[in-house]
Amino acid sequence: MIRPGCVYGKQGGLTGDWFSGADKDEVLKVVGDGNNRWAMVHADDVAEAFWRAAESGLSGEVFNLVDRSRATIREMATAAGCTGKIEFIPVAEAAKTMGDFAECLALDQHVDASKAARLLGWQPKHAGFVDDVETYFMSWKAAQSYTRSG
C-alpha cells in the first residue's frame, strides 16, 4: 500500500487551486491559521515509488511518501503568489461548507517516509513546493492553456 502525502507538481491538487487564485488576483482562503504543515510530495516522486514498489516483489507493506520540506501553509501560499491576499478561515466556520475536510486541511502533519527509503531505496528528488514554486506555476499555467485549447 502506498500512502502519498499532499501531491503537487502537476495541474491539479490543492496547490493548483492556489495558483488559480493567484493567477486571477483572487483572495486565497486558507483553513486555519496557516501555521500548520502538510506532508508534501511531488507527483513524479510518487510515480517512482509506485514503480519501485511494483518491482520490489514486496507484498503486504505500507509505505508513506513525503519529501523533507517543512514549510508552513502560510509560507507555501505566499510562495504561490498570494502575498497579502490570504484570508484565514477558522476551522469551525470552514466546516459549515466543507464538512470534515476542513479539519483535515488544518492538521499539522508529520509523516515518516524512512521505510520507503529503507526497503525500496526511494528518495524524493524534488526538494519541496516552495523551493521550485516558479517551475510548478509555469507547469500549471501551461496545463491550463492546454486544457482550454485541447
Image (tube, grey):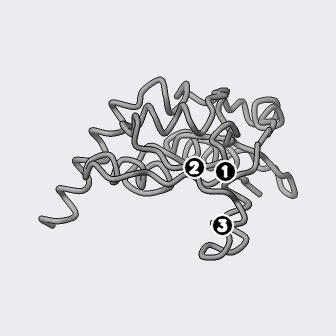
Q: Mark 1 Cα within 10 Å, few/some/many (few <14, many 20+)?
A: many
Q: Residue at x 77, y 37 (%)?
A: 116
Q: What kind of element bears circle 3?
A: helix
Reading the image, the residue beneath label 1 is: 32
* Camera-nearest residue between 63 and 71: 71
Answer whether labels 2 and 1 touch (C-beta < 8 Å): yes
Q: CA distance from mark 1 to mark 3?
A: 10 Å
**Disc 3 to disc 2, C-alpha distance:** 10 Å
**Disc 2 versus disc 1: distance between alpha carbons?**
6 Å
Mark 3 and mark 2 lie on one chain; the one further toward the N terminus is 2
Marked residue nearer the N-terminal end (2 or 1) = 1
- Of all residues, the one furthest to the right in this rendering is 60
| Amino acid of disc 1 | Gly
Looking at marks 1 and 3 on the same chain, the residue that comes earlier in the sequence is marked by 1
Asked if marks 1 and 3 touch (Cβ < 8 Å), the reply is no
Q: Few, some or many C-alpha atoms within 10 Å of disc 3 (few <14, some 14-19, many ≥20)?
A: few
Image quadrant where residue 97 sits: bottom right
The mark found on residue 67 in the picture is none
26 to the left or right of 142: right
- Quadrant where the N terminus sits is bottom right
Tell me: residue 83, above or below residue 12.
Answer: above
Q: Secondary structure at mark 1?
A: loop
The residue singled out by tag 2 in the image is: 88
Residue at label 3? 93
Q: Around disc 2, counting alpha carbons within 10 Å, would you say few (fewer than 14), some (14 to 19), or many (20 or more)?
A: some
